[in-house]
């Protein structure tokens, strides 16, 4: 199995590149942000809970997020592999993911991290907010909170995978197709 973690700050381009990668590699795409938004739209109990955090630019609690992710993984009997997009976002989530995959006799192959500086992120998110309808992309204070949470809670996940020699940083600024090419080159080395 090819199991990829696509990592990077909010607005780095994870969703865009995931869409291209799943097509190329026939992987199951699991975006925790997308799953939360689908639950919010559907008015589920999970959606109501998630919304209260997402609207403030905070992370949804680990317990809730890990349980949701595990149930999504378990829906797929014999996948070629997964692309995890927006997960893990904390060290606890990373450890839980390792445990879950180990129980299925598999593991994370590679973490591909899109690197984009903060000023560019702020610009991209505000631009996306104009037509995405995402409330968390429309308010500069919420955007800043997400970036701060990323720096404080999510950055350590990079060290988690570096320690396993699985971390690859990719420049996330430039043409979408060039960034995609750089990601593919790393995957082809595996
Ligand atoms: P972005 O990467 O642009 O911030 P996402 O769609 O990945 O967007 O996530 C949107 C929001 O959903 C996050 O700000 C957070 O509140 C919540 N969320 C997504 N993934 C996780 C996660 N793994 N753990 C906790 N909260 C999450």
Image: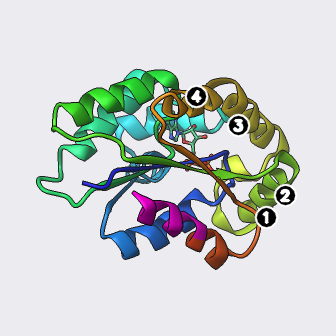
- Callout 3–callout 2 Cβ contact below 8 Å: no
Please tell me whether mark 1 sits on a helix, a strand or a loop: helix
Residue 183 falls inside the magenta stretch: yes
Numbered label attached to residue 156: none
Position above or below: 33 against 89: below
Q: Is residue 189 magenta?
A: yes
Compute the Cα span from label 4 to label 2.
27 Å
Residues in magenta? 182-190
Counting from the top left corner in percent of width and height, residue 82 is at 32, 54
Q: In the rendered image, which residue does mark 3 sit on?
A: 146
Residue that carries the numbered disc 1 in the rendered image: 127
**Residue 68: % across, % down:** 32, 36
Disc 4 under 8 Å from ligand 1? The reply is no
Residue 123: mark in rendering: 2
Question: Could you tell me how far apart the alpha carbons at marks 3 and 1 are, in whole angstroms?
Answer: 16 Å
The answer for how far apart the CA atoms under marks 3 and 2 are is: 14 Å
């Amino acid at each position: 199995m090819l199991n990829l973690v696509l990592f990077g700050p909010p607005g780095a381009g994870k969703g865009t590149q995931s869409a291209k990668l799943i097509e190329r590699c026939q992987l199951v795409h699991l975006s925790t942000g997308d799953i939360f938004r689908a639950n919010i739209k559907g008015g589920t109990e999970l959606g109501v809970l998630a919304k209260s955090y997402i609207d403030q630019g905070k992370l949804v609690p680990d317990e809730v997020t890990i349980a949701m992710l595990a149930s999504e993984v378990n829906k797929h009997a014999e996948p070629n592999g997964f692309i995890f997009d927006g997960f893990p976002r904390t060290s606890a989530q990373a450890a839980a993911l390792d445990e879950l995959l180990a129980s299925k006799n598999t593991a994370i192959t590679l973490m591909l991290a899109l690197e984009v500086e903060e000023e560019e992120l702020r610009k991209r998110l505000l631009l996306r907010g104009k037509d995405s309808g995402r409330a968390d992309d429309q308010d500069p204070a919420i955007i800043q909170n997400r970036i701060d949470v990323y720096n404080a809670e999510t950055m350590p996940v990079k060290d988690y995978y570096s320690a396993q020699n699985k971390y690859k940083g990719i420049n996330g600024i430039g043409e979408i197709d060039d960034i995609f090419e750089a990601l593919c080159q790393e995957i082809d080395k595996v």
